[in-house]
Image: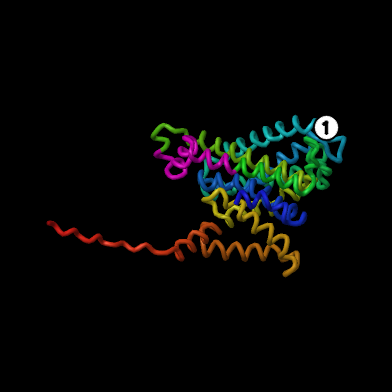
């Protein structure tokens, strides 16, 4: 898969490289933060796109944009770390507010935070420029490479996606990740063993916020703008759909679901009207969830188990004693 990902931009057209592959990697990275929270922490958050939007807006305000009166004009290597720090701090705050609840209450709290941030950026003109948003956001020219072009931006998104995927795979095997899974399965018993349930959950939100923040900056560079529509309610739900489509129990599932989502978003309008796109996504979502609660990777696992050659047990023949 890694070899295919590295060779893809050299055999695909710029449209597929940028509009499909690069966008899938960016959305997959944001969905990976939700997969980590839901799959290994047992916490479903609808505010991951909000955290990504905070990072994108912070990058636009601290860096350069079309609104010179709002943007501070910091160089990218200063603005990017501060944008990540602001987003991670907000993610930790969201986690601190929501981890004391479970189930539907956690979902409603994170949804309320996402909707509140949407109306904040929609109605605030002094910092976020209201419904017009902040435009002309482009990745910087580093090492003489124009990262706005399809192939360089694809490799930038691929590098960030691989780093995020590797970080998740490593952290779930580390003592913190193992303890977090114990908190997911039985928080009362973990508390009795001396583990701080709240601290582990807030730390998980902070780490997931870092993943979403990196994806948010990439998304701002990909679209070239940050508007309230980028953090609207529809995108809060879309990230959940992407994560569930691929499979919440597998980190790679976030990227698999993102590829399917982007393909449907790109080519479904050739079959149905643009306004009917959500109906197509909803139908595919229902079909996959009903057939496999573990998403596309769950279907793949079922297919492998069904068509794999069965191993027959043979009874060894007893040796004749002399």
Is residue 180 shown in magenta? Answer: yes
Quadrant location of the C terminus in the rendered image = bottom left
Can you say whether 90 is above or below 234 in the image?
above
Q: Residues within 10 Å of mark 1 (few under 14, many from 20)?
A: some
Q: Position of residue 174 (x, y in %)?
A: 49, 36
Q: Quadrant of residue 245?
A: bottom right
* Residue 194 or residue 317, whichever sits in front: 317
* Residue 248 or residue 251, whichever sits in front: 251
Q: Residue at x 72, y 52 (%)?
A: 9
View extreme (left): residue: 322
* Residue 215 or residue 128, whichever sits in front: 215
Residue 111 visible here? no
Can you say whether 288 is above or below 236 in the image?
below
Q: How many marks?
A: 1
Query: Is residue 66 found left or right of 116 in the rendered image?
Result: right
Q: Residue at x 87, y 36 (%)?
A: 68
Q: Residue at x 58, y 48 (%)?
A: 107
Residue 246 visible here? yes
Q: Quadrant of residue 205?
A: top right
* Residue 72 or residue 81, whichever sits in front: 81
View extreme (bottom): residue: 271
Q: Identify the element where label 1 is drawn.
A: loop
Q: Residue at x 74, y 54 (%)?
A: 19
Q: Position of residue 195 (x, y in %)?
A: 44, 33
User: Which SS does the magenta portion mostly show?
Assistant: helix
Is residue 253 shown in magenta? Answer: no
Q: Quadrant of residue 50?
A: top right
Q: Position of residue 318 (x, y in %)?
A: 19, 59
The residue labelled by disc 1 is: 73
Please state the extent of the stretch shown in magenta in the rendering: 165-189
Q: Position of residue 285 (x, y in %)?
A: 60, 62
């Amino acid at each position: 898969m890694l070899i295919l990902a590295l060779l893809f931009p050299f055999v695909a057209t710029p449209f597929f490289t940028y509009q499909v592959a690069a966008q899938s990697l960016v959305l997959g990275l944001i969905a990976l933060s939700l997969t980590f929270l839901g799959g290994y922490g047992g916490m479903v958050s609808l505010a991951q796109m909000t955290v990504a939007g905070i990072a994108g807006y912070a990058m636009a305000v601290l860096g350069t944009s079309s609104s010179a009166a709002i943007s501070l004009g910091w160089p990218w290597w200063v603005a990017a770390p501060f944008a990540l720090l602001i987003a991670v701090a907000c993610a930790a705050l969201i986690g601190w507010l929501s981890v004391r609840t479970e189930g539907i209450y956690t979902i409603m709290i994170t949804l309320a935070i996402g909707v509140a941030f949407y109306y904040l950026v929609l109605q605030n003109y002094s910092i976020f420029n209201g419904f017009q948003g902040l435009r002309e956001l482009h990745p910087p020219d580093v090492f003489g490479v124009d990262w706005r072009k399809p192939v360089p931006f694809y490799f930038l998104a691929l590098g960030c996606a691989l780093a995020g995927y590797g970080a998740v795979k490593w952290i779930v095997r580390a003592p913190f990740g193992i303890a977090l899974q114990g908190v997911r399965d039985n928080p009362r018993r973990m508390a009795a063993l001396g583990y701080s349930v709240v601290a582990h959950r807030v730390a998980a939100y902070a780490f997931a916020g870092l993943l979403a923040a990196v994806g948010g900056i990439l998304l701002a560079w990909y679209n070239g703008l940050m508007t309230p529509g980028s953090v609207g309610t529809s995108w809060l739900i879309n990230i959940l759909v992407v994560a569930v489509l691929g499979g919440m129990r597998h980190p790679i599932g976030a990227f698999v679901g993102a590829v399917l989502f982007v393909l449907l978003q790109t080519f479904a309008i050739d079959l149905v009207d643009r306004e009917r796109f959500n109906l197509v996504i909803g139908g595919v979502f229902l079909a996959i969830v009903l057939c496999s609660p573990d998403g596309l990777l769950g279907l793949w696992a079922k297919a492998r188990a069904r068509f794999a050659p069965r191993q027959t047990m043979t009874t060894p023949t007893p040796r004749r004693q002399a």
